[in-house]
Image: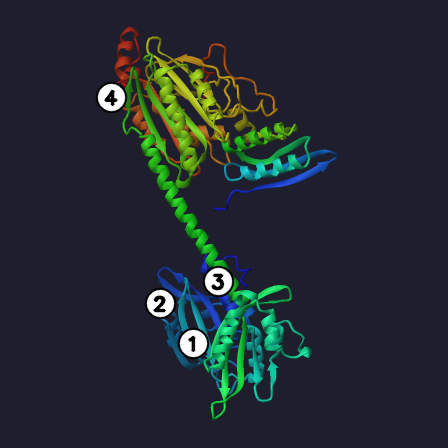
Amino acid sequence: VGDNQADTPANTGAGWLPVVRELLEQLAGNHIVLLPISQGEEIVDFEIVAASPQVVDSYGRPRDEMIGSKLRETYAAVVKGEVWQAYRAAYLHGRPTTVGPFSYPATSVEVSPPRFTVRLRRIGDGLLASWNRHDDLREPKERIAQTERLANLGWSERDLIAGTTSWSDQLYRIFERDPAAGPMSPEEIEAVTVPADRPLRRRATERLSVGSPADVTYRIRVGGKIKHVRTIADTIRDLHGRPMRIFGIVQDVTARVTNRTRLAQVEQRLHEQQQNLAAESRLVTELQQIILPIPLAPFDLSGLRVAVRYLPAEQASRIGGDWFHAGVAFDGSVILAVGDVAGHGIRAAATMAQLRQAFVTLSTTATSDPDELLRYLNRLLLADPDGASIASAVVARFDRASQTIQWAQAGHPAPLHTRKGATTQLARPPGTLLGALPDPVYTTTSFTIRPGDLLLLYTDGLIERRGRTLEEGLTPVIATLNELTAEARPAPLADLLSQLRRANPRDDTCILAARLNPAEAASEQMADAGSHIIAGSLQQT
Amino acid sequence: VPWPKLAFQTIRSGDRVSLAVAGELDLATGPSLEQTAIGLLREQPGELILDLRQVTFCDSSGIASLLRIQRAAKRTGSGLRLQNVHGLVRQVLDLGGVSGFLGLGESAPTLRPDGLPPPSPS
């Protein structure tokens, strides 16, 4: 129904509509669901987007022809009067409303116009309209049969005096029994009842025998499948109160039960998932704040000025594995590093914490060699019993005396280096991802940093976006760096961080930018008959 | 947002099994690739060929999956061969420094002997 209505309101993503459609399938009578069509604030029309199977409109059109039609276009006579007002009001105010009986103006050669009562009720983002046609002339017997079929409803009648039972056609269909075999005996019904539900059925029979009506839903196994049937039964007595007949209505409610169960299951799962997701992202965010407090302003470290920015993923659940370090090593050199642990969530955050902790310990006590630090980290990850963690990192060491930056990488994008408006990605020495191989080669390489230069270490959330190559991802970053260093600025680091703000929706990003400490650079500048451009950038950051 | 998906097709010729992979290889889809590939290795030890022609994205989680498949192959005395590794996938494997290890032949090192950055692209 409505599958061919590509651009109608029916397809605007209403999640309730499929459920309502399924419900309508179960209903006898005339029911339609309409969605409003608005122009600005005003509702100008309604479109029929779903209908019960046997619905017939005032023109005698069946369901297939009604779906997709608009109230105003198709039932023009409606639009002016009280009926239209009722539709609008029921939708806008959400109050169930009944209009009628009213007549449509004679539409054809009918001598007397048909009369209707319409009940309106807001449902989801739409309107449910149900109506009775008071002068419905369709044959009552045929209607009963149709109702039976549509509602999957059968009836049985047991004459207790004559000892006979009769079943309606539909009841044979429900129990998948050949009508020629005649109705089933109570014992036969007991036999096809699922054993677990037999006590339920027996209790209902007992209630019936003491004069109360019974209403019980139980499962039967017929034709190799399980059906849920609801039976409503009552006893008809003679003047002396003696039971004469038992009248029962039996409905196959399997579809309803399975739909309800499925819905409940989906709801439950969704609920659990949401709870877990929310709890996990809260925890990850807290973890990150504990492990990795981000300094808000640029800070100075033994000759370098450093700034850090962390851009969390747009989806909170994607946050997790990025880390940075900027600190002074045991030998007085400055160690800068950023890293990324594969994966997201608590697991990645835990691995990140472990790596960073080890890194800080090692660099403050054991070594300041970038390649050696990476070898330690690799060993640490390989020692992980799961063997499941993989990470990348880039480590740089600033030596104040020689003004050199030594660096090494493990499966990580090379830092960017900007000098006077020109940015290059540093040439990467070999280096495999951490945790991938038992004995990888890491090599340290170096360059001299000059006053005014910018060094940018980053995790690849900055450049890695789906649907484009790594170079394409770098282009805007490089453009920003070039612009920022093309002319003197009082606070290039702060400007840089504020411009690299856009988060990657799929991955968090960590950016660490460094330049020579302005004071340091100034003393350097005395010797160097330096340019005013560089001098200009020596103002406070 | 549709969930990222990975589709597989197994092609057998003689005693060689080739698994054609299509889609995005990441944290969400990696486990399904591992499961499928390791299942094939168990079923038919020997050489498993992973055809990555239709893989449009791969991240470090995807690399981890490939490495785990390779580890599983080695454990059972089998081999893993990657085929049609192109574009972004190749770039990511190179970036991770695992191309050589995965039998792709290391891309030439871009390091200059003096360790200085190459000239600016602009």
Viewer-proximal residue among A145 and A183:
A183
Dot label at residue A118: 1
Whole-number angstrom distance, CA of label 3 to CA of label 2: 25 Å
Separation (CA) of disc 3 from disc 4: 67 Å
The nearer-to-camera label among 3 and 4 is 3
Residue A150 in the image: x percent, y percent? 56, 73
Q: CA distance from mark 1 to mark 3?
A: 28 Å
For badge 1, the amino acid type reads Val
Q: Is residue B94 left or right of residue B51?
A: left
Residue that badge 3 annotates: A260
Q: Earlier in the sequence, mark 3 or mark 2?
A: 2
Instruction: From the viewer's side, name the closer residue of A322 and B79.
Output: B79
Amino acid on which disc 4 is placed: Gln
Q: Categorize mark 4 by other alpha carbons within 10 Å: few (<14), some (14-19), many (20+).
A: few
Is residue A327 at all visible to an observer of this figure?
Answer: yes
Residue A245 percent coordinates (x, y): 54, 86
Q: Secondary structure at mark 1?
A: strand
Is there one chain holding both mark 4 and mark 1?
A: yes
Q: Residue at x 47, y 64 (%)?
A: A20
Q: How many marks?
A: 4
